[in-house]
Image (cartoon, coloured by chain):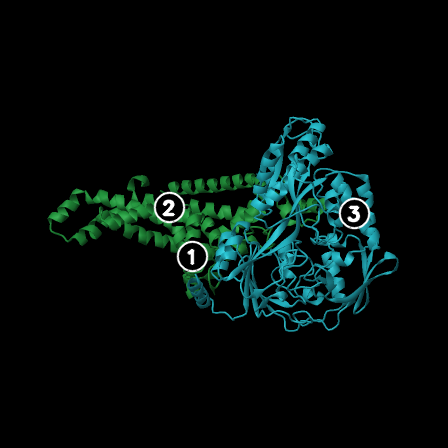
Amino acid sequence: MTRLFAAATLAAGLAFPAAAETFRWSSTTDPSTMDPHAVSSTPVLGFLTNVYEGLVRRGRDMTIEPALATRWEPLPDGAGWRFYLREGVTFHDGAAFTAEDVRFSYERAASEASDVRSWFAPVSDLVVVDDYTVDILTSTPQPIFPDSIANWMMMDSGWAEANGAVAVARDAENFATLNANGTGAFRLVSRQPDLETVLEPFAGWWGEVEHTVTRAVFTPIQNPATAVAALLSGEIDMINPVPVQDAERIDAADGTTVLRGIETRVIMLGFAHDHAELQGGGDNPFSDVRVRRAVAHAVNVPAILQTIMRGSAEPASQLVPPSARGFSPALDSRPAYDPEAARALLAEAGYPDGFAFSLSCTNDRYINDEQVCQAVTGMLAQVGMTATLEAMPVSNYWPELRADNFDMYLLGWSPGTFDAEHPLRFLVHTAGDRLGTWNFGGYTNPRIDELLPMIQSEIDDTARQAMLDEAAATVQDDMVYVPLYVEPLLWGLRDGIEVTQRPDNFFVLRWVNHR
Amino acid sequence: MLSYIFRRILQSVLVLLVVGLVAFAMFRFVGDPVETMLGQERTVEDIERLRENLGLNDPFFVQYWNFLVRAVQGDLGISYRQGRPVAEIIAERLPATLELAAVSGLFALVFGIVFGVFTAIRRDGWAANAIMTLSLIGVSLPTFLIGILLIYVFAVELSWLPSFGRGEVVQLGGWSTGFLTQSGLIALILPSITLGLYQMTLIMRLVRSEMLEVLRQDYIRFARARGLSQKAINFRHALKNTLVPVITVTGLQLGSIIAFAIITETVFQWPGVGLLFINAIQFVDIPVMAAYLMLISVMFVGINLIVDLLYVAIDPRLRS
């Protein structure tokens, strides 16, 4: 095996006579655009975080730290936030970074065509105080505003104007779709969509260089088996993600390891709270909290994690993972696996013989999602709830849920702000045009609706946490969702390279080190 | 003659229009593109506005009509996923597919004929039997499995060949070619074998059975009686007469090589139009799907049209 491996590295060296510290990595999805405001998705924002920077950024442990702003403070009376900008920062084309660029980036990112405009929903205005100070005014106090704009990236106003990229490139192509000009540690050297994107370190970067990369090449590889082969053969230094079932093999192979971590996405089961009838006819049992609790007791989460996730994921008790801000440590226990209790609860609710319903599920969105649903179906059948599994691709899934064609469904939620308020806003608040947009089941609770705006504007951390605890307890008591587990992060890595795995699944090149 | 050609062309156009109509009627079952285009913090308002902008609220035949009107003006629309003109994206990706298809077709033809002739002449030799047995694998194993198998043997275990991609390419005008660099040529080997294996087996079996048929004919026997060398009989007399059906089948198979490239391109991350199409389905990128389907049907209809016209040229009875 060692001889084979030696041959492998030799051949790889012959086939790719690149510089020693060229770093090649791959992921299943190509960032669809280089425009930092056009698409709010992990592949795009995670890639562009290497090229563009925001006022603040997240550190290795997800804490907020200074980036293009050196410090910030709340304005009196919760009127907004003041950011003090870093001086001497230049964009990749040499232009200086000033408050004007912040203003331009705000107007661009908050415009109608932008996909990140929801970050600026509470913002009423942005005032340039001087060249290196800006005030962001908000209509209500916003205690976690700096956290919520960690991915808001700064674009040079002069560059955008000169190249016709002032508007967000979404429905039509513009210069920013294929080109980038940020302040980040890496600059975009070449961009071929779906093929190859090359980055090189930016010599004029303001920060201290911690990496050993001289050139970084990103190649999307959609087929997971091909990506694994490319890693094993030495053509690629890092792949994300590693299929759960291949992790052991990569670990066992010479020269490669799997870096395991926990993501921020919680996988849960949701219910049709407000439907009068099931899809197949008959009363809707899921409007009864005892039935929902029975589901929680009937699903054997440790078994799912052991078999389908091969020990990689962690059980979840709330709608956010324990690492998120605002998580309630006191409520960190999920209902135990107890089929007897489940049966008793069903009998109490008036379904001693169980009932039949449909379980909707994606088959291409989350890690092994369809297998998880099959396992859930089997486990529920043991207590008398016979589910018909309806698995479909995600592009059909959301329209089905939005059209109320479900009884019970699988959902994964990753809190964009990394804060416990996020799922309350989208999953638990009464469904409406702007709030509760993912509350497909139609759960409604006046107390949650009352708590949400208070949580959003509470400056005092203790008071805020108390309200988040109360909301988390309500969600648990009402069993609005049954949280199952937090998805794992599995990156395949070539030996001799150090990377940092951040829970938001962003791959940060400036933390890549060759040993 | 002229009216025959005119009628065939008219029929071809009709087929194209029907294919497009069916495609557009199906797109709504692929899913809602808006859901994948917007981030999770979208509002209902955002969804509605985007649907309206993209014309997705129109009935499918209206969408189809709009597509046709723009398409005849050379505008294939903007990709939902990449936000770039579809015509530009397809022009970028088409050379990869065409080069792969050409090499696979050549591979299938050359090896198919050589093996076919060999197995026909040495009907009972062990080598011929081995080739026949192995060729069963070619027809029975699915393409993606063959691809993965080749990757594991030649890329992972032996490290002789790359596991994905096209290697380095050279731009010649608007055409990116992998024929001019060493890494580009090496990268072609595994995908073309994967893609061409099925066609090779097909041609091989066709040549073999035709050849066996021809070798039984009287004129072969007479040639032998004339004292001609075995080589002259096999290649000048027998092979020549087996090639007519082979050429017909090969021509028709060329279309399916390009269409079947989807799977091979996915396995090898080959940046052609097939991979683009797979991506488009996952993302519900309707403009790209529509353009690809139209492209493939134009190609198939075109090939069939040429074959039909060739028949006219060959068969005098059709000309009257």
Both on one chain, marks 3 and 2? no
Q: Position of residue A73 (x, y in %)?
A: 82, 63
**Chain ID for green:** B
How many marks can you see?
Answer: 3
Q: Mark 3 points at which residue?
A: A469
Whether residue B254 sits left or right of residue B35 in the image: it is: left
Q: What residue type is labelled 3?
A: Asp
Within-10-Å neighbours for mark 2: few <14, some 14–19, many 20+:
some
Callout 3 touching callout 2 (CB < 8 Å): no
Callout 3 touching callout 1 (CB < 8 Å): no
| Residue at mark 1: chain | B
Where, by quadrant of the figure, is residue B48 drawn? top right
Q: Name the residue under label 2.
A: B252
Q: Which amino acid does label 1 sit on?
A: Glu
The residue located at (22%, 46%) in the rendering is: B124
Callout 2 touching callout 1 (CB < 8 Å): no
The residue located at (71%, 46%) in the rendering is: A319
User: In this picture, is A159 found above or below A116?
Assistant: below
Both on one chain, marks 2 and 1? yes
Q: What element carries label 3?
A: helix
**Chain ID for cyan:** A
| Residue at mark 2: chain | B
Q: Can residue B61 be seen in this view?
A: no
| Quadrant for the N terminus of chain A in the image | bottom left
CA distance for labels 2 and 1: 17 Å
| Residue at mark 3: chain | A
Q: Which of marks 3 and 2 is in front?
A: 3
Both on one chain, marks 3 and 1? no
Q: What residue type is labelled 2?
A: Leu
Q: Nearer the viewer, residue A376 or A42?
A: A376
Of the numbered discs 2 and 1, the one sitting upstream in the chain is 1
Whether residue A15 sits left or right of residue A159 in the image: it is: left
